[in-house]
Amino acid sequence: MYTYKTSGVCSRSINFDIADNKVINVSFEGGCNGNLQGLSSLLEGMDVNEAVKKLKGIPCGGKATSCPDQFATALQELVIGK
């Protein structure tokens, strides 16, 4: 299980697992519950690199980052950058 402490967004952290380079068991602590449950469901089983490609750079409400962007950063730092 990976845990990533977010920065600059409403959610406080993201928990997830990786199996066979696929994202599984994604959950966000805090943030917009419905949106983040939807994002978690859409990410389930997605290839790590594909998830980064789709989510990196998405802003939120005038912020330079978002929960999806923070998840892409988590994947880059904790999984890809290992």
Image (tube, rainbow, N blue to C red):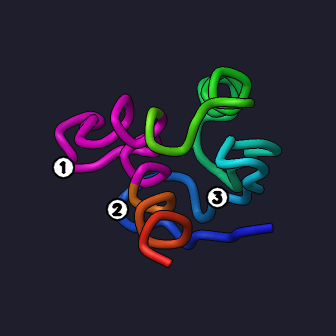
Which residue, given by chain and number where applicable, does mark 3 sit on?
14
Relative to the observer, which residue lies in front, 75 or 70? 75
Q: Amino acid at mark 3?
A: Ile
Q: Position of residue 50 (x, y in %)?
A: 45, 33
C-alpha separation, residue under disc 3 versus residue under disc 2 = 13 Å
Q: Say if mark 3 contacts mark 2, CB within 8 Å.
A: no
Q: Say if mark 1 contacts mark 3, CB within 8 Å.
A: no
Q: Amino acid at mark 1?
A: Ala
Which residue, given by chain and number where applicable, does mark 2 sit on?
8
Q: Say if mark 2 contacts mark 1, CB within 8 Å.
A: yes
Magenta stretch encompasses residue 66: yes
C-alpha separation, residue under disc 2 versus residue under disc 1 = 8 Å
Return the disc, 3 or 2, that comes first in the chain's sequence.
2
Q: Position of residue 34 (x, y in %)?
A: 68, 24
Q: Residues within 10 Å of mark 3 (few under 14, many from 20)?
A: some
Return the disc, 1 or 3, that comes first in the chain's sequence.
3
| Disc marking residue 64 | 1
Q: Secondary structure at mark 1?
A: loop
